[in-house]
Image: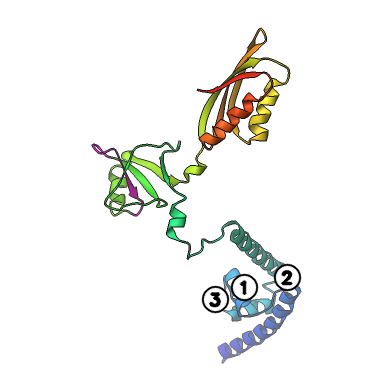
């Protein structure tokens, strides 16, 4: 009888707590429904909605805690929207060829070197697959898919022969090239050169050095370009600078 009375009292308090919760959430612009109730139960680590309403009824869950819940709910929604914007889903109906055709070159190691290789027959990787290189004894580098049936065995028993590898879009690969310049020294020449390289053509310049002797200058510039066409255009533009006689690639 005592237990029944206590349960009845708890239900009465819970009923009152539910109405209190409804009003408090309304002030926070949250509707009390099945979804928000489940979120609250999970947030406060409770077992049932009855526990939730009862705690609101006796004041264990107060305004400060409910505001904290509303804030966390808002932050989670903002993060969800941001992720949707930053990481658009690839349409399921995109043609496989459209995806793999962008990844037409395989490179190895942190320096992304181009090396000779063969594709492993056991898993037949194709452009775009997640892969790794395995340095064989007699057949050079064999490229395997990460989920190749032999991958676990190779990586656990021969870790020292595993090479980092990945497919890239060759049109986006960058190359380092060194240029030699010479000509007549004059005021502002270095500024003109760096302006053409960095400002006008948006080429990344890794290093630059110049020397001058009796009014004649010589210099070396190391640049990073995406392709031969961009490098040729850069050389042509440098040759147009007043005072430069010669520009050549090392």
Residue labelled with disc 3: 47
What residue appears at the point 29 percent right and 42 percent down from the top-left corner? 158
How would you rate the neighbour count of disc 2 (Cα within 10 Å): few for under 14, some for 14-19, many for 20 or more? some
Indicate the quadrant containing the N terminus: top left, top right, bottom left or bottom right: bottom right
Q: Position of residue 154 (x, y in %)?
A: 29, 46
Q: Is residue 14 left or right of residue 171?
A: right
- Kindly state the secondary structure of the residue where label 1 is placed: helix
Residue 95 falls in image quadrant: bottom left
Dot placed on the residue nearer the N-terminal end, 3 or 1? 1
Dot placed on the residue nearer the N-terminal end, 1 or 2? 1
Q: Nearer the viewer, residue 219 or 68?
A: 219
Magenta stretch bounds: 136-147
Residue labelled with disc 2: 63
Q: Position of residue 238 (x, y in %)?
A: 63, 26
How would you rate the neighbour count of disc 3 (Cα within 10 Å): few for under 14, some for 14-19, many for 20 or more? few
Residue 66 falls in image quadrant: bottom right
Instruction: Count up the numbered dots.
Output: 3
Residue labelled with disc 1: 40
Calculate the distance from the C-alpha at mark 3 to the C-alpha at mark 1.
11 Å
Q: Nearer the viewer, mark 3 or mark 1?
A: 1
What residue appears at the point 66 percent right and 27 percent down from the top-left corner? 194
Q: Classify 11 as above or below 40.
A: below
């Amino acid at each position: 009888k005592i237990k029944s009375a206590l349960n009845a009292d708890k239900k009465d308090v819970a009923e009152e707590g539910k109405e209190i919760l409804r009003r408090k959430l309304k002030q926070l612009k949250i509707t009390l429904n099945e979804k928000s109730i489940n979120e609250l139960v999970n947030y406060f680590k409770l077992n049932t909605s009855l526990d939730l309403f009862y705690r609101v009824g006796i004041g264990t869950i107060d305004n400060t805690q409910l505001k904290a819940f509303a804030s966390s709910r808002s932050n989670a929604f903002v993060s969800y929207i941001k992720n949707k914007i930053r990481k658009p889903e690839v349409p399921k109906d995109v043609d496989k060829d459209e995806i793999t055709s962008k990844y037409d070159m395989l490179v190895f190691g942190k320096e992304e070197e181009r090396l000779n290789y063969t594709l492993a027959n056991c898993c037949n990787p194709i452009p775009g697959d997640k892969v790794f290189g395995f340095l064989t004894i007699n057949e050079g580098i064999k490229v395997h898919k990460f989920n190749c049936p032999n991958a676990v065995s190779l990586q656990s028993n021969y870790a020292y022969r595993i090479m980092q590898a990945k497919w890239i879009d060759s049109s986006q690969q960058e190359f380092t090239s060194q240029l030699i310049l010479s000509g007549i020294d004059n005021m502002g020449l270095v500024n003109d050169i760096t302006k053409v390289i960095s400002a006008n053509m948006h080429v990344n310049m890794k290093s630059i050095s110049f020397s001058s002797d009796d009014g004649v200058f010589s210099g070396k510039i190391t640049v990073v370009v995406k392709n031969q066409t961009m490098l040729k255009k850069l050389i042509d533009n440098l040759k147009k600078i007043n005072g430069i006689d010669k520009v050549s690639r090392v």
